[in-house]
Amino acid sequence: MEITELDPTFKFDVTREPGGEQLMRCFACGTCTASCPVREIDEKFNPRRIIRMVLLGMREEVLSSQFIWLCSTCYACQERCPQDVRITELMSAIKNLAVKEGHLPAAYKMQLELIRNMGRLYEIDEFDNKKRSKAGLPELESTNEDVKKIFVMTGADRLIGGEEGGGE
Amino acid sequence: MTQDSSGSGRVLVIGGGIAGLTSALQLARSGQAVDLVERDTVLGGHAMLFTCKATDRCQKCTVCMVNDRIREILDEPLVRVRTGQEVVGVERADGRFQVRLKSAGAPVDAAKCIACGLCTEECPTTPEPSISLASDQGMPRVYRVSEETCLVYLGKECERCVAVCPTEAIAFGREREIAEETYGGIIVATGYRPFAAERLTQYGYRHFPDVITGLDLEMRLRREGRLTRPSDGSVPKRVAFIQCVGSRDVKHNRYCSRVCCAYAVRCANKLSYLEPESEIAIFYMDLQAFGKDFAGWRDRLRGRVRLVRSHPAFIEMAPEGGLRLAYESVETNQIDREPFDLIVLSVGLCPGSDTAGLAEMLGIGLDEDGFLLARAREAGGRSKGEGRGGLGPDETLTQVPGLFLAGTCQGPRDIAGSIGHASAAAGAMLHHLRGSQLVTVEERDDDARG
Ligand SMILES: Cc1cc2nc3c(=O)[nH]c(=O)nc-3n(C[C@H](O)[C@H](O)[C@H](O)COP(=O)(O)OP(=O)(O)OC[C@H]3O[C@@H](n4cnc5c(N)ncnc54)[C@H](O)[C@@H]3O)c2cc1C
Ligand code: SF4
Ligand code: SF4
Ligand code: SF4
């Protein structure tokens, strides 16, 4: 990669994001990576390397990657990091920045659409409601207007609005 | 040499580790009478627990220096050694210190004990007798009772050692005597406490018997002359060292302890000399190479000791038994769970456990890490010269005139550094007693400017 493709302001954008404040403390010891259960099954995910990439200014590579979405927020790394980098929160900060810059992965976008439209992640149809009433449970609405309002209020609506969800 | 040449009375040195010994000796050699108060029954402090790290050649770990200093102190007529005592009160009036000293009430009277060992033979506790020589080479040579295992301390009847001692040196339930003394000045040399490795639960210290600390390693090597595993007494073939355990860790001690890279490297070197077949690895973040001959170690260890750049995440027990160390090699991006027979946690130096109480009694402060506060650092830190660990005399001054700091009670240092610092403290004390002003670098520069 060319040095001109590196963005020296990237790390500052991450530290400004809530949760990303402690980024610069990392001294690349590797404790987080060897603690991470995701890394153990998927070599593409390596929290120490992600932090290095941010510090180096690899904005596009990080924000458009699939791997930043793999963190399971288990906090194992954060608990052990000797520099208190708060890696789990940092991973959330990086994901938030990715979304802001239009890198919401398609799968998440679909999930958001389902939640906005129905208030839940899977569709309730007549068959479900029949089963429920047999069991003596009340019927469920197939849409939820309150959740739609929340989407508008929080701006989540705009992420899945008209256009394609941005630069994948 | 005249006793008390300055007319200010005796000087009190608190703590008989390498720093306190050095200050006391320097003062005595300049004609100043000194009381050296040590809480323990033997002199020497931590360095008395360590192993000589020589192979077929001296490796300059300086551990042996403390033995020489103790011998010199015991031969020095101007130094009164008061072991088994501690300072319980300090009052300052007219530039002098009224000090209350309390004997620790140890059952064995050091003045009477002739170190014959009859008590040890008589003691019924197993596997270790509860009364034994306080330290293999410690001086004065005196026996000590372990409060953890002695039947009397456990509330049972025994006192068989009392009956067998030919000089009637042993008595339980001794009164804790209080003595009052006046001193012209005090040097505090109360040392440090090693980091409590069990606080890092991911390494399982005290849970896995074959996970030991650097201090345990030093003591085992000193006692046995070789390294065996606590679990089964076998000689470990694969040994790992984890550096910076509790140091450079903002959740514990954020500072570098300055001694653990050096002792780990020298111990690894010694282990590979003792057992050339063994596979030894040091897991480090960066090797802090203090001292001018340290840099060459990397080359000297090549082919014998593996240096892995990584801070391991945790230690676990493998399903088939045996320890496994989980780490990422930062150079290859690979994670591993490597089996080891024994793992050493290279613990660093923390402020002594009663430092806060001591500071309050002496009327001085603590720095942000809990060490005793030197005056120069309190005045907004230094703009030039050494930081903590330097040898400048300003690092020995406190906000109380006539009260000076020596050695690791002020911050992490190795033995050589503690000796340098303690010599500076003795020099500052002599200046104080003789009424001359000690000029610090800052003051001199200020004078030149103003
Ligand atoms: C595992 C390990 C290995 C090390 N190996 C090396 C090495 O190979 N080479 C090297 O140069 N350095 C080594 N060091 C560092 C070395 O231990 C210190 O530099 C040195 O011991 C400091 O001496 P000191 O006199 O300041 O403190 P200490 O050795 O702690 O002595 C302080 C003394 O004061 C006494 N005391 C404390 N409080 C009171 C009180 N209130 N009243 C009376 N007495 C009191 C204590 O009982 C003690 O005897 C090692 C450190 C560790 C943890
Ligand atoms: S554990 Fe902390 S200091 Fe170490 S590499 Fe991970 S984030 Fe950086
Ligand atoms: S919080 Fe995320 S990055 Fe950290 S160990 Fe868990 S999955 Fe890995
Ligand atoms: S001396 Fe070495 S092991 Fe000790 S704290 Fe400093 S870097 Fe870590």
Image: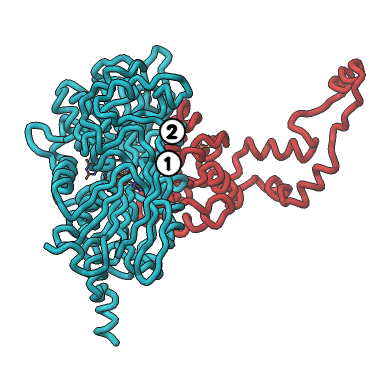
Circle 1 residues within 10 Å: few <14, some 14–19, many ≥20:
many
Task: Decide: is B217 above or below B42.
Answer: above
User: Where on the picture, by quarter, is residue B114?
Assistant: top left
Q: Which residue is mark 1?
A: A48
Q: Are marks 2 and 1 in contact (CB under 8 Å)?
A: no
Which shade is chain B? cyan
Question: Is the CB of the residue bearing disc 1 within 8 angstroms of ligand 2?
Answer: yes
| Residue B198 numbered tag | 2
Chain bearing tag 1 is: A
| Horizontal and vertical percent position of residue A150 | 78, 47
Q: Are marks 2 and 1 on the same chain?
A: no
| Horizontal and vertical percent position of residue B226 | 19, 24
Q: CA distance from mark 2 to mark 1?
A: 26 Å
| Residue B130 numbered tag | none
| Horizontal and vertical percent position of residue B450 | 29, 87
Q: Disc 2 marks which amino acid? A: Glu
Q: Disc 1 marks which amino acid? A: Arg
Task: Decide: is B448 above or below A161.
Answer: below
Q: Ligand 4 shows up in which quadrant of the image?
A: top left
Q: Residue at x 14, y 23 (%)?
A: B276
Regarding mark 1 in the picture, which secondary structure is present there?
A: helix
A48 on left or right of B122: right
Residue closer to the observer: B60 or B70: B70
Residue closer to the observer: A75 or B147: B147
